[in-house]
Image (cartoon, coloured by chain):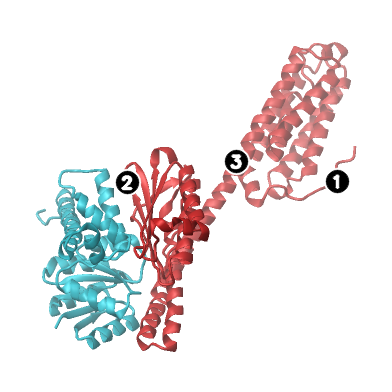
Chain colours: A cyan, B red
Amino acid sequence: MISVMVVDDHPMWRDGVARDLTERGFEVRATAPDGEAAVRIARAVQPEVVLMDLNLGATSGVDATRAITGELPATKVLVLSASGEHEDVLEAVKAGASGYLLKSASADELVDAVQRTANGQAVFTPGLAGLVLGEYRRIAAAPEAGTPQLTERETEVLRLVAKGMTARQIADRLVLSHRTVENHVQSTLRKLQLHNRVELARYAIEHGLDGEE
Amino acid sequence: MTPPAPTAKPRPGREADHSTTPLWRAAVLLRVLTLVFAAAVVFAYRHEYARPALAWAVLGAMTAWTVVIALCYLPEHRRWLWFTVLDLVVCCGFMASSRLVLTHDQLTVTGVPLVPTVWVTGVVAVGAVRGGLLAGAGFGIVLGLVNFAVRGYVDTDLSRDMVLLTGVGFVLGMAATSARVSAQRLALALRAEAATAERERLARSIHDSVLQVLARVRKRGMEVGGEAAELARLAGEQEIALRALVSTAPGETSSDGTADLVPRLIVLTTERVQVSAPSTPVLLPDAVGREVVAVVSEALTNVAKHAGPDAKAWVLLEDLPDEVVVSVRDDGLGMAPARLDDAAAEGRMGVAKSIRGRIGELGGTATVTTAPGAGTEWEFHLPKGRTR
């Protein structure tokens, strides 16, 4: 049974999602109304998947995502947001979230996404693929040593995801296995997260925030 | 001497009045300083004038008039148009009085100034500040002509005075107009900023409440089914429309004439259309951006009409180093190349032609890929060099 925690500041939504997931056979270990509580509770209950809203009033879902994925390597964060707030979604993914789903997704889509997240797969919407493509191109405009790049194949796959194709359709079009397509998508995310972590560390060292001063 | 009817309608707006206040003050200061100069001239020529007593009287009247105009021009609410015209007439009167004050020789020798001297320049400044460059130049010409009339002849020196007076009016008028325009622009910019802030506040509050409820209604309704499913569908439509609306900043054009294509495409989001874009602005010249949005809308309309009732569409915006790429894909019926003739009959090819033509006019290329059952995919490539 996959263990889940639901983080959302809106009680109606939080309880609704928790009930849906329980009905579908997930173990909802906890819910949290804000980012701070989310980090504290996640530490205690160690869920496999955290469903994270980004709009948490005063606290930021992005910071909570960074703290949880940093501290608990076995816990995956799936962003579930009603927002079209592009930058937020991109930041959350760079901070370690393994996917993004719109709140308007159906219950079936939600269940499928949570299962895939628990299996270590990336959950992409076309919108997220467009954001990730854009981010790679943004950092490619001012490349430094260690700047991650997309391979041609990865770019091809991401573009097709952004145009609304499913992994299976992409596999058919590019004559690849379904698994290979999934791996390409996931690798685009992992490179971006690694780069983000390196950047943060470098920033911390340059600004004396690494605890040695 | 009848002053023009007091048409006291405040021509420039309230803000514009504000913006020229420093210029009005400067014009009044100019009158005071030049009055001192006029007094010094009268003092210097006091023994040589034909009528010295009248000279002192005119100087006294000028002093009194300077006080009157200061009282009228310094406060914003008394800058009546009729008073400015009266001011011009009075100044001309003072100039004319020189015919009685100066001797005939003094009038014909340009070395001796008229009684008001450069004091009259002040009224040109007032005219310019009041009515812009044409009024300023006009006041200058009037004074120049009166100068000719009082002297009774025209020569290089007097013509030079005329040109200087007209030029001063012209330049000050331009300055006043540009001050007014800048003030109006600033007011507009401040209003736009306030509107954006208000919009963001609304977006936050809608996001925290209405959207969450709509999303929940939609989801529950779908699960319950039946009539509830219909309600859910309605809630879903509104949710998506509202989300697209509040998540999008108004598509403002920046000062260099470029505009961000991202918000303009994002608002095309509906229940059946998803839009993907980078998180950073994608800048294109305003007109190009509008045309691209129009073409994408046309392609989406085409999907809604011909791709089948269940067809969904995706729009992808990409910003590459040398081009902007916009793709529109649908998962609808598509069509076989052999059916292009039928399609022409149905009017679909007309649309395809129109889309190609419009993108071509922007210096870009449009390609379409389609097959039966595999949907239709448009890709628009817009080179940045040509379009920027």
Q: Tell me if I can see residue A33 in this picture.
A: no
**Residue B300 in the figure: left or right of residue B322:** right
Crowd tier of the residue under label 3, counting other residues whose Cα lies within 10 Å: few below 14, some 14–19, many 20 or above: many
Image spot of residue B80 (x, y percent): 76, 46
Residue A195: x and y in percent read: 17, 53
- Tell me the residue that label 1 is attached to: B5
Marks 3 and 1, how far apart at CA: 28 Å
Residues at marks 3 and 2 on the same chain: yes
> What residue type is disc 2 on?
Leu
- Kindly identify the residue that appears in the image at 24 percent across and 57 percent down: A157
- Within 10 angstroms of label 2, few (less than 14), some, or many (20 or more) residues? some
> Disc 1 sits on a residue from what chain?
B
Q: Which mark is residue B179?
A: 3
Callout 2 secondary element: loop
Q: Amino acid at mark 3?
A: Ala
Judge whether B112 appears above or below B274 on screen.
Answer: above
Locate residue A176: give its quadrant. Answer: bottom left
Q: Position of residue A21 (x, y in %)?
A: 24, 83
Of all chains, the one bearing label 3 is B
**B55, above or below B104, in the image:** below
Cα–Cα gap, marks 3 and 2: 41 Å
Residue beneath disc 2: B320
Above or below, A104 against A183 in this view is: below
